[in-house]
Image: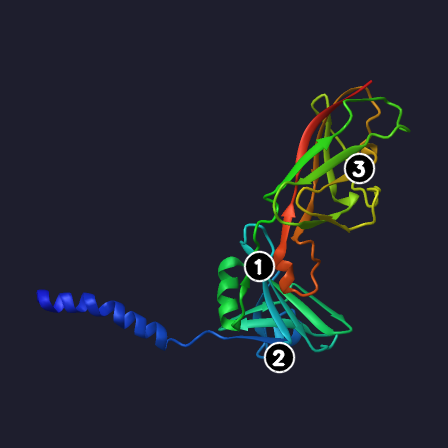
Amino acid sequence: MLTRRQFSFLVTALPLLRARQLRAAPVATAEIWGGERRTSSAADTVVVQQDGGTGYAHLREKIDPTQTTMLSTTNTNTAFQLWVAMSRQPDDQWQYLGMGDIWWRAHHIGHDASGSQANFLFDRATAVRLAAALKIPLHERRQLDGGLRYSWSLPATATTDTSIAIPVTLRIVNAGKTAVGFLRDGRFFKFAVSRDGKPVTTKVVGNPGAGSAPAELCMLKPGDNAEVTCRDLRRWATLDHPGKYEIHATFNSAVRKEGVMPTTAAEQASWWDIAPDARGTILVA
């Protein structure tokens, strides 16, 4: 049995011992390799995490990336992607990331004139560990739309004549102190429609015509405003029967600080998703 003095000494010493253990513990390292996808386990394969499940890979050679960047992919900073650039890799190889005994297969891979690229998707806890192992910063998103104010307009009435367009307009006002830019494209509209309480089938519209080029960058300095218009709601849903139509409109886009479009992977961290929405009714007679 410990005496009171021995117990007091042990309680005092434990934090110091723990700190020494943490300093002495080896720092986790992470590596990126090129390899072949396999369909079954073998002596020359490793188990890899992929697409929410597991698979197998035969690793060929270690890759020294030219750039590794850990980026948040959500406004809540709960999901991240590791973006990796490297020299041109063989077309028949995938990229794999390993830390300790765990391996992940890239979510997407690609090539261009600058070389090859790969991205890996992780939850926050895993991203934190990997960023530390790779000795790179964790780029989190910062809210950028706090000063934006949204208003919608749609006609109160319409006719059953399908040749007469039903426009819907979103107006965005920058009431904040920071200039932002957003991607303006009519394809970013989404609509849910019902008539007299019953859902109406809606369509996916590839080129509705927003009055601007696809993915046009629209700058909003403090005090500025801009509009995005859906030229004709009828392209999403057929409003050709009399009745009261309930409309739920959404515009899914993103804003960037100072409107600067990304030229590097790290600049993607300044991205902030927006999805202003509104509900209204149109009486068709």
Answer whether residue 1 is visible to the viewer in this image: no
- Disc 2 to disc 1, how far (Cα)? 21 Å
Please tell me which of labels 2 and 1 falls first in the chain.
2
Please tell me which of labels 2 and 3 falls first in the chain.
2
x and y percentages locating residue 134 in the rendered image: 53, 72
Element marked by disc 1: strand
- Disc 2 to disc 3, how far (Cα)? 47 Å
Please tell me which of labels 1 and 3 falls first in the chain.
1
Q: What residue type is labelled 3?
A: Cys
Q: Dot 3 surroundings within 10 Å: few (below 14), some, or many (20 or more)?
A: many
Asked where in the image residue 270 lies, by quadrant, the reply is bottom right
Asked if the residue at tag 3 contacts the one at tag 1, i.e. Cβ–Cβ closer than 8 Å, the answer is: no
Specify the label residue 230 is tagged with. Answer: 3
Element marked by disc 2: loop
x and y percentages locating residue 280 in the rendered image: 70, 26
Q: Name the residue under label 2.
A: 64
Q: In this view, does 197 lie above or below 62?
A: above
Q: In this view, does 59 lie above or below 176?
A: below
x and y percentages locating residue 92 in the rendered image: 73, 74
Q: Mark 1 points at which residue?
A: 80
